């Protein structure tokens, strides 16, 4: 699946992500309590809620990075028991909170590392060109050490690196964290292109109003449970947002 210059989809597109009755616990203390959600191809779905609600744990559990029970289906395939590196090969990529680029490596080398989990090596050059077109700063600074980039530039690199694995499902944990308003706009414009190209996008965010307006639907988590589902038209309803965070 490729992203053309106009954001159009080409090639086969998977059916997306289905999570059923997901549970996560740390030392016997529940963090995620039986949540279920779906992100179809070409959709963006948000996860919002107060700190400690279980948002990041949900993403890590889907990636196989922490223990869980319940079912996670990727394009209809149950990926239970797979370690993160094999989950990537099923078509899932995670952009973690804090970006975690390889600071001592160049931008170009970071992107090359992102391609390690590609399912189709033949599409490497095309994918790289599309990412450099989406994020021109990565082309301009290809030989610069990643650690010398600004926060917004590093976030673009982190997303580009994830896209190099050719995912059908892109998950992002706090992509706007610490970014300027201009950088946030750049990141979410790219996510809109990625959604338009037929990929499923699952995004954890603290910017509730922004996330609700952007996503096709947004789930509110409280104490590891989904307590509310919001649509874009709810973004400016102060009473709804207050209820979402404070009950």
Image (cartoon, grey):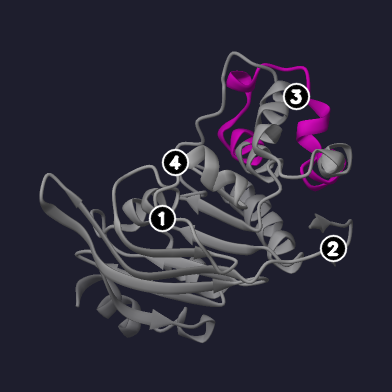
The residue pinned by badge 1 equals: 80
Mark-to-mark CA distance, 1 and 3: 33 Å
- Relative to residue 204, is residue 4 drawn left or right? right
Magenta span includes 134 = yes
Q: Mark 1: which secondary structure?
A: loop
> How far is disc 1 from disc 2 in space, using C-alphas?
27 Å
Question: In the drawing, what numbered circle is on residue 199?
Answer: none
- Image point (71%, 21%), residue name: 109
Q: In the rendered image of this protein, does residue 92 appear above or below residue 246?
A: above
- Which region shows up in magenta? 128-157
Q: Which of marks 1 and 3 is in front?
A: 1
Mark 2 / mark 4, whichever is N-terminal = 2
Left-right relation of 15 to 206: right
Viewer-proximal residue, 49 or 122? 122
Where does label 3 land, which residue? 108
Crowd rating for badge 2 (residues with CA inside 10 Å; few <14, some 14–19, many 20+): few
- The residue beneath circle 4 is 83
Q: Which residue is drawn at 38% across and 42% down?
A: 65
């Amino acid at each position: 699946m490729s992203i053309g210059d106009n954001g159009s989809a080409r090639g086969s597109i998977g059916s997306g992500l289905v999570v059923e009755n997901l549970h996560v616990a740390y030392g016997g203390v529940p963090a995620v309590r039986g949540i279920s959600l779906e992100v179809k191809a070409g959709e963006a779905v948000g996860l919002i809620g107060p700190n400690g609600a279980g948002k990041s744990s949900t993403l890590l559990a889907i990636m196989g990075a922490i223990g869980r029970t319940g079912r996670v289906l990727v394009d209809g395939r149950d990926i239970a028991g797979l370690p993160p590196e094999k989950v990537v090969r099923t078509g899932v990529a995670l952009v973690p909170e804090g970006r975690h680029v390889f600071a001592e490596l160049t931008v170009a080398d970071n992107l090359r590392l992102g391609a390690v989990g590609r399912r189709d090596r033949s599409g490497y050059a095309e994918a790289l060109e599309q990412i450099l077109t989406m994020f021109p700063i990565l082309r301009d600074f290809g030989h610069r050490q990643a650690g010398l980039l600004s926060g917004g530039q590093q976030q673009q690199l982190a997303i580009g690196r994830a896209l190099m694995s050719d995912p059908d499902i892109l998950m992002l944990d706090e992509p706007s964290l610490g970014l300027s308003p201009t950088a946030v706009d750049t990141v979410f414009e790219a996510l809109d292109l990625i959604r338009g190209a037929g990929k499923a996008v699952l995004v954890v965010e603290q910017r509730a109003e922004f996330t609700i307006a952007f996503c096709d639907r947004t789930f509110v988590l409280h104490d590891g449970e989904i307590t509310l589902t919001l649509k874009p038209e709810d973004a400016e309803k102060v009473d709804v947002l207050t209820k979402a965070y404070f009950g």
